[in-house]
Image (spheres, rainbow, N blue to C red):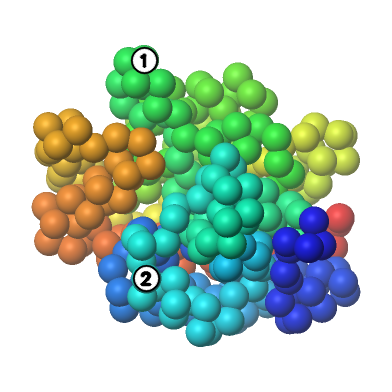
Amino acid sequence: MVDYLEIGKEVAKALRLGDPVVALESTIISHGMPYPENVETALNVEKIIRENGAIPATIAIINGRLKVGLSLDEIEYIGKKGREIIKVSRRDIPFVVSKKLDGATTVASTMIISALAGIKVFATGGIGGVHREAYKTFDISADLQELANTNVAVVCAGAKSILDIGLTLEYLETFGVPVVGYKTDEFPAFYTRKSGFKLDFSIDSVQELAKFISVKWELGLKGGVVIANPIPEEYEMDYETINKAIEDALKEAEESKIKGKEITPFLLEKIKEITQGKSLEANIQLVYNNARLAANLSKELSLLL
């Protein structure tokens, strides 16, 4: 693994000293937002993590190398190439590495590379999940199986509201993945603070959250934890408006026969168009919010693990 894994000097030093580190994905840069907003957002997220006392580690695959802690030039490179870069989940890693290609990491692949590097906390926008009509398509994100198997805590604004949230939560329960609401007892739906689905676990302090996670792993219960951190109220979108936009986007995707890993970027782009850019602003703000919580959680966990 040493042959493929390349950890930036700053991140390596923090890990060696046991200092807090927060992993960040790169698909949000390449596929989640247009240039230059994608690069600006990525750099702001790193800045927020530093301001809250942790070291950011943006992750991607560049020229076949598993890179943990991208440089400014590397972030700019991924942002400019955008969707030309391969979207990499678990199954894609060996192909991209063996062919010495570039890859942007999803939640699943970021978790894998985080675990290889020894990073325990990861901040993202929203996790993948069970897609609507999965009973016909079997379209279920690899993120869910990774959460069942890889010991990384994932701070997110819930699941993207283009998914079947009820089935996503059922799937996570089946595989023993705790879903913990941070200062909420309702699972957030990315752009909105509500989804209609209540949570079994709600925790109001970062210290308690860190203790919950450390106990899980100390008990030998493998797998991640989903920390559901709702978008701040001032940035959330109207529930009915966003759901109407999603329904319209899903209909267009079906008519255009867009499937598989291309469905999420397509839907997010269409929703942005339908909402006249409001969904992009909401997306950016919820990522910032997750970065703050992840940095503080990483600090607390570093004292326990």
Residue found at x 41% / y 66%:
29
Is residue 53 shown to the viewer in this render? Answer: yes
Residue 282 position (above or below residue 253): below
Which residue was labeled with disc 1? 135
Element type at mark 2: helix
Q: Position of residue 212 (x, y in %)?
A: 75, 43
Q: Are there few (<14), some (14-19), or many (20+) residues within 10 Å of tag 1?
A: few
Residue 70 position (above or below residue 116): below
Instruction: State which quarter of the image contains the N terminus.
Output: bottom right
Residue found at x 53% / y 36%:
142
Closer mark to the observer between disc 1 and disc 2: 2
Kindly identify the amino acid type of the residue bearing the numbered disc 2. Answer: Lys
Disc 1/disc 2 C-alpha distance (Å) = 35 Å
| 256 horizontally vs 217: left or right | left
- Which residue is at the front of the view, 16 or 139? 139
Q: Position of residue 287 (x, y in %)?
A: 44, 62
Instruction: State which quarter of the image contains the C terminus.
Output: bottom right
Residue 27 position (above or below residue 39): above
Res 45 label: none
Which residue was labeled with disc 2? 81
Quadrant hosting residue 117: bottom right
| 193 horizontally vs 202: left or right | left
Kindly identify the amino acid type of the residue bearing the numbered disc 1. Answer: Tyr
| 104 horizontally vs 173: left or right | left
Residue found at x 34% / y 21%:
137
Q: Position of residue 258 (x, y in %)?
A: 24, 37
Is residue 24 shown to the viewer in this render? Answer: no
* Earlier sequence position, callout 1 versus callout 2: 2
